[in-house]
Image (spheres, rainbow, N blue to C red):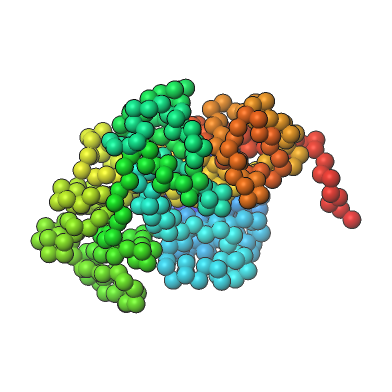
Amino acid sequence: MNIIIVGAARVGRELAQYLVSMGHAVTMMDEPSAELTALSDRLDLRVVQGDALSPALLRRAGAENTDLLVAVTSSDEYNIAVCSLAAAIFAIPRKIARIRTPDLLAEASALFNGQALPIDHVIAPEHITAADILDLIELPGCVAAAMFADERVVMGVAVCRRGGKMVGSQLEALQADGKGRVLALYRQHESVRAFLQETLAIGDEIVFCVERSRALSFLSAIGPLDPGAKTIAIAGGTHAADELARNLSSRYRVKLIEPDAARAQRLLARFDSSRIELFNADPCDPDFIHEEHLDDCDRFIAASPSDELNLIAGQLLKRQGCPRTLAVINKTTLSDLSVLLGSADVDLLFEPREAVISALLSDIYQDGVIKLRLFNSGRACAAELMVQEGSRRVLGHKISDITWPSGVVLGMVLRGRKLLPCSNELELQAGDRLLVFLPDQAQLRRLSALLRPRVSWIPKVRLWS
């Protein structure tokens, strides 16, 4: 597929890297910069420097033969304009835009429907970040999680903690009751083979697949469930923090701390009818922490624009007695450094980039891929794929008789409204939705090809009159 990416900031660069690895022909467009020039030396893609709102420049980028345009600059207006230009002049079939403005997102169904504005998919990083953090709050012990099969199945990564019911037992026993499946085991960040015979130890990272209604029961075997949260404090300053506060306020008492006075005034009007308690203060100020009893909160989430402030605030609140703290980290290098230094005072470091890139790839990927979620710093992924009619290499065959790509681990199958375990005797049918884990996300291309119809297959229904 021929793809143009407009915007060479971090999201654009990482998206380009994944798309190139999948075999797509990628052209990157942005204003001239050293980073953009270096990108063409590092990746097998084409770079066009300049204003993407220039029809001549878009034509030079190959817009006339492009299947997909992705606009991910920091300006919503620019992204919308580029998509509109691509549709009006070049009739590019699919357009994806990054949109961050809350007012635009509130009217998304009316605006971004392919008619009012020619945009097929909208990516809202702040909404994605807020939704992922909300999942982590409600799934104790998880360091990453995503919902699949119409939100009925959780696939994620959980850390084994002291007090887990199955600590010291074989992993095979963890899935004996059929409530969930263990898909992989990482010990000291290294993958373990033949893991079902391994004894579960504190600190082990388990990749799992479980029905959402049974997730807490499954996770209680890995580590003790935290007492139910009642009060959550959020260090804000970003759209993600605002969205998270809004989502949480219906279930929890929420304290949102906004350091910027002007921004706090704007939020005051926006949250006027909500239950959110808004403070204009420094979340690292010890006097403020004690005055407003932040140390008595059940959860503290540091989601400011500064990674450094998030780490410091998370560590400070943890030392003050807050049971669970989470810091949002956008710089991978800083996150890696924190792991190496053993940043034990923060319970969880959350990197939004994996969730955002996963959402983009889910919208871009075709070939029967319904949804995917990157894990393990983007090296692994969980995916939901459709078994298509005409897939002769898998249809009617037992799972044990199919030659799967290297490393693929099967989780569950959604057949109609039924969730089925991937037993060796199960025969796949057209329309089945297969949930899998791939330690090497590059194998997703081979897996999707396996589930597609062969080139020689002729559909039963006539497509012509």
Looking at the image, the residue that sits furthest to the left is: 287
Residue extending furthest right?
465
Is 171 or 318 nearer to us in this picture?
A: 171
Residue 463 lies, in percent from the top left, at 84, 51
- Could you say where residue 244 lies in the image, as x and y percent from the top left? 36, 61
Provide residue 25's location: percent of width, then percent of height: 59, 41
Quarter of the picture holding the N terminus = top right
Q: Between residues 26 and 104, which one lies in front from this camera angle?
A: 104
In the rendered structure, the answer to whether residue 168 lies left or right of residue 113 reads left
Residue at the spot 49% in from the left edge and 57% down from the top edge? 123
Q: Is residue 418 visible?
A: yes
Identify which residue, 66 or 243, lies in the foreground. 243
Q: Is residue 30 left or right of residue 306?
A: right
The x and y percentages for residue 309 are: 22, 52
Whether residue 110 sits left or right of residue 220 in the image: it is right
Q: Residue 423's image quarter?
A: top right
In the picture shown, does residue 292 fall above or below 161? below
Q: Is residue 66 above or below residue 447?
A: below
Residue 199's image quarter?
top left
Quarter location, residue 347: top left
Measured along the vertical axis of the image, is residue 92 above or below residue 158? below
Viewer-proximal residue among 178 and 363:
178
Does residue 441 appear in this view? no
Q: Please give the name of the residue rendered at 47% of the width and 67% of the height, measured from the top-left corner.
A: 105
